[in-house]
Image: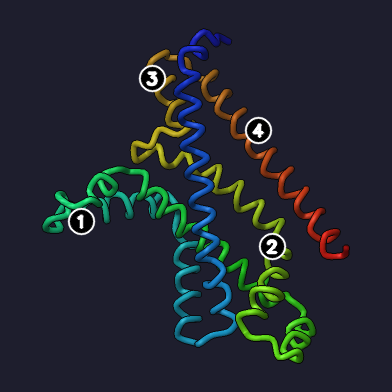
Amino acid sequence: MQWYWLPEYAPKFLEGLWLTLQLLGISVFFGMCLAIPIGLVQVTGPRPLAWAARAFCTTIRGTPLLIQLWLVYYGLGSLFPAVPGIRDSFLWPILREAFPYAIFAFTISVAGYEGEVMRGAFRGVPKGEIEAARAFAMHPFTLLWRVWLPRAIQNTFPTLAGELVLTLKSTPLAATITIFEVYGVGTIVRQETYRIYEPLLFIAGIYICLTGVIVLVFRWAENRIPRARAG
């Protein structure tokens, strides 16, 4: 084992780690913002929207994330330059970068998987709690915001932790569209130093540490929320 290369590439790994955390945080945040209405509409309707939501979840869950990423990057990415005036607009500096396409692909992936999870979570909330809120003439939006949604999210906490970890482990796919996150930096190290195992072991250690942090945070939150509610 030779680690002479680590001090030289440590700054690049830090930059790659920051990119990884950005991919993870932004895609999970916006993915969950989409997953909540996708799950809710499958329970409440109307039927056309429910069918559309089910079709979306089935499509996303039934296709590999790598294919989705390439379709977004090489598909949408190749269409935008053909739009008249796009190169001269303020959007071009954003659209010519790979990062927004990766964010979009990871976001719809999270939305597809968690949308189905949220459907089950909304259905899993006891009907008695919903009926009690309605008996107090609670406004439907207030009922959703203060009763239905918090209980549904509480039910999905273990699944949310798992989805966060799966999304984290999917971020190396971004290296296939020239985003040099942690794995992408490791690939550069392997190409320039001809060291194979050490960079891979180092990258694996980073992902293990990040996964451990995610699991501990969600475990703490999962144990904390019931006490807060009980108090």
- Give, as a three-letter code, the residue at label 3: Gln
Determine whether label 4 and label 3 are within 8 Å by CB. Answer: no
The Cα–Cα distance between marks 3 and 2, rounded to whole angstroms, is 42 Å
The residue carrying mark 2 is: 156
Q: Position of residue 222 (x, y in %)?
A: 77, 55
Return the residue nearer the eye: 185 or 84.
84
- Give, as a three-letter code, the residue at label 4: Cys
The Cα–Cα distance between marks 1 and 3, rounded to whole angstroms, is 32 Å
The residue carrying mark 4 is: 209
The residue carrying mark 3 is: 191
Q: Position of residue 13 (x, y in %)?
A: 49, 25
The Cα–Cα distance between marks 4 and 3, rounded to whole angstroms, is 25 Å
Q: Is residue 164 left or right of residue 86?
A: right
Mark 3 secondary-structure assignment: helix
Label located before the other in sequence (2 or 1): 1
The Cα–Cα distance between marks 4 and 1, rounded to whole angstroms, is 39 Å
